[in-house]
Image: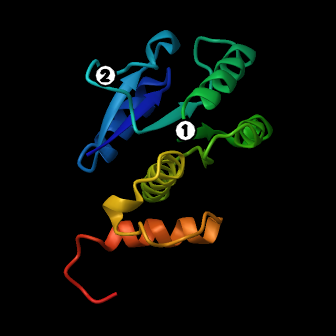
Amino acid sequence: MMRIGLYSEDRELQLLLSYALGKEFQVLLEPNEEDIDNPNPGGNSDVLILDLTPVHDSLADRIDYARDMVGSHPATIVMAEDGLQSSATELVQLGAYGICRKPVSIRDLKNMLRRAHEDSLVKDDEEAPALKASGCDRMLGSSPQMQQVYHLVQCVTNLNASV
């Protein structure tokens, strides 16, 4: 089960997302920015959702903190209202996976979470390739297109189907 770290001071949003995502995802709620790096004593989250909307913090503090988090988490989704789109876009340019608009579409958020997680797995594979384990040890190439081929091979390795 994919672990989602949700950093938001908005208790209603926390309840909504933990209920809506709870069947497919394990949602780790964390309103305190100091503790988001380790929301679960057993390990870190696979994807992080950062809500830019300030409740108690100032907007400037929230955005500064989000900049730090984007650099340290490989798969980060920024959740922002329309008035904060420029800040959210800046965070994407700094390395966040994408922007989820508020009010949130649960279906779109689920799809984005899956894609962000897959993207972070591909990046992990590129950094430490396990080509022998996926049966790609005789294939040559490191271009982005070949990385996609390696990823596809790895995804279908355990399937009993013609590809």
Farthest residue toward the left? 160
Q: Is residue 30 left or right of residue 90?
A: left
Q: Is residue 67 left or right of residue 34?
A: right
What amino acid is found at the position of numbered circle 2 in the picture?
Asn
Q: Residue at x 40, y 39 (%)?
A: 46
Q: Residue at x 41, y 60 (%)?
A: 131
Q: Is residue 52 visible?
A: no
Q: Residue at x 58, y 27 (%)?
A: 72
The C terminus lies in which quarter of the figure? bottom left
Residue wearing tag 1? 74
Going from the N terminus, do you reach mark 2 or mark 1 first? 2
- Residue 81 in picture, x, y percent from top left: 66, 39
Describe the element under mark 1 as helix, strand or loop. Answer: loop
**Residue in front for this viewpoint, 133 or 108:** 133
Residue wearing tag 2? 40
- Residue 56 in picture, x, y percent from top left: 58, 11
Q: Nearer the viewer, mark 2 or mark 1?
A: 1
